[in-house]
Image (cartoon, grey):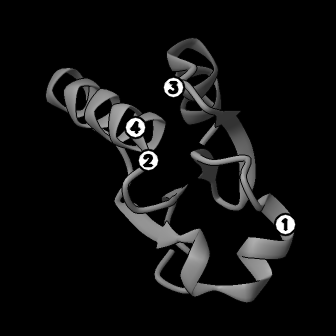
Amino acid sequence: MSGEPSAVLTLVYRRDCLLCDEMLAALRALERTQPLPPLQLRDVDEDPQLQRRYGLQVPVLLFQGALVCRYRLDVPELRRLLRQV
C-alpha cells in the first residue's frame, strides 16, 4: 500500500572508519547478488541522537529501525530479516 513506509536499511557510520567502509563494501557486494531495500547512510557525528545511542559502536546496520548487526555485516541475519517482509 502507498501509505505504508517502505523497507529501508540504515547504515550508521563514521567518516574515516575502516570497519564502516568494510561494512558498506560488503553491503554493495551483497546488493550485486540479491535485491536489497534502499540504503540510507547516517553519519553518527552529525546527529546528536545517534551519537548518544551508538557513540563509538559503529558501524551499525538497521533494518526498519531495528538492529541487524554491529561492526561486521551479518549476512544470514540480514537475509532472515528480509524474508520476513
28 lies above or below 11: above
Q: Crowding near pointer 1: few (<14 within 10 Å), some, many (20+)?
A: few
| Disc marking residue 17 | 2
The residues bearing labels 1 and 3 have C-alpha atoms spaced at a distance of 19 Å
Query: How far apart are the two marked residues, 4 and 3, measured between alpha carbons?
Result: 13 Å
Q: Which of marks 1 and 3 is in front?
A: 1
Res 68 → quadrant: top right
* Nearest to N terminus: mark 4 or mark 3: 4
In which quadrant will I find the C terminus?
Answer: top right
Specify the amino acid type for callout 1.
Arg
SS at circle 2:
loop
Q: Compare residues 61 and 51 and report the one nearer the observer.
A: 51
Q: Crowding near pointer 2: few (<14 within 10 Å), some, many (20+)?
A: few
**Can you tell which quarter of the image residue 48 is in?**
bottom right
Q: Which mark is residue 53?
A: 1
Q: Are marks 4 and 3 in contact (CB under 8 Å)?
A: no
Q: Which of marks 1 and 3 is nearer the N terminus?
A: 1
Q: How crowded is mark 3: few (under 14 residues within 10 Å), some or many (20 or more)?
A: many
Q: Which amino acid does label 4 sit on?
A: Leu
In space, the residues marked 1 and 2 are separated at their CA atoms by 18 Å
* Residue 4 appears in the rendering: no
Sequence-wise, the earlier of marks 1 and 2 is 2
Residue 21: x and y, percent? 34, 41
**Residue named by callout 3:** 73
Q: Which of marks 1 and 4 is nearer the N terminus?
A: 4
Is residue 3 in view from this perspective? yes
Q: Is residue 64 left or right of residue 19?
A: right
Marks 3/2 in contact by CB < 8 Å: the verdict is: no
